Amino acid sequence: MTLSFFKLLFSILFHPYFLLSINALCIFWYFYYLILYQFVYFKMNNLKFGTDVKSTNSAVSFQTRTSWRAPIIWEGMFDPKVFDQKHIQENSTVALTVFAVGRFTFLMSAEQHFMLGLPVTYYVFTDLPDKVPNITVAPQRSLKVMQISKHNRWQDISMMRMKTISEAIELELRHLFRYVFCFDVDQEFKGRFGSEALGDSVALLHAHYYKAKEPAFTYDRNVKSKAFMKTGDYYYHAAIFGGTWENVKHLADACYLNILEDKLNDVEALWHDESHLNKYFWIHKPSKLLSPEYCWDKHIGDKSDIHIFRLVWAPKHYNTLRTWQNGQTITTEYS
């Protein structure tokens, strides 16, 4: 090729109009793929494609996804039939763990509302296995009672459950279930708590703080604690967390090791395992967040955002649930 050809080619490639058209084309494809990614992401997760804020009226608005693009599940964002069909086709299996110190209304209500249509096993950890009532469960569902050691304080039960969950996953759950969900027992199911809640790593927005600003969050501000947080994204409620068994085990192991280190340093986190859980989710972002519909406190006056109660808090009666006499555990209330 002659030198004049290369000069002509050079003049075309670096001509201002040509460069502008190339830049415009690149910008077009960038935004095209950005929008396409969002659309495919929401379709893949059976969520409605929309904006970051859901508004039911001019006075109410709240997030439906996080800054890292994790969906926040609210009523109206999903088609239950699509989610259920997807997880039935994928043969999804769920283990529900709960530490029962006296209340079993939770289990009976779970049979009416939790992951209906999927294989579920309830793992009830208790120091009083003989007190667990016989509950009739649906086909593909079962109940397994696991005896654990007694603890003097409910705070110790709360914190040591991370160790117990990790051990249960390692010994049994990982061989049988794809998903593990961990619940507090002082709750009662009131509405669908279905397969839309399943995900790789699932956290729950605390009903009392989902509208609050970060300075109001009750993170552990003690710099001596492994749960210490100076700032964060959201305040999560430890009453519910879940995900694949791998992710739940990683969470439980991390929280337990941090709890142990605090104990060695004679430190107790402000809100016990919940403080450590918030620290974990600050570092390891959850892939899905559940809205306060999934664990609501009916004592909250403003419930304008809540169109369905899926799970509600039950009164906590720590003094009546567990008392000690002559070194023995005396449980005085069952419901």
Image (cartoon, helix red, strand yellow):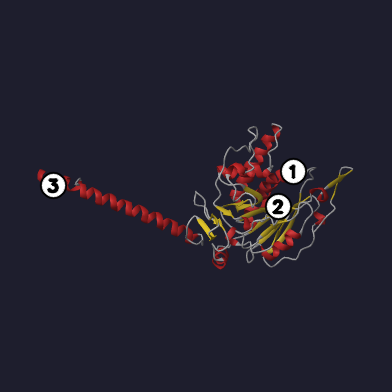
The image quadrant of residue 226 is top right
Element marked by disc 2: loop
Q: Amino acid at mark 3?
A: Leu
Q: Which mark is residue 236?
A: none
Instruction: Name the residue: 83% across, 50% down.
Output: 320
Q: Which mark is residue 8?
A: 3
- The residue wearing badge 2 is 184
Element marked by disc 1: helix
Q: Amino acid at mark 1?
A: Gln
Q: Give 294 or 57, whichever is nearer the viewer.
A: 57
Element marked by disc 3: helix
Q: Earlier in the sequence, mark 3 or mark 2?
A: 3
- The residue wearing badge 1 is 155
Q: CA distance from mark 3 to mark 2?
A: 74 Å
Q: CA distance from mark 1 to mark 3?
A: 79 Å
Instruction: Name the residue: 49% across, 52% down.
Output: 69
Q: Amino acid at mark 2?
A: Asp
| Residue 154 x/y as whole percent | 76, 45
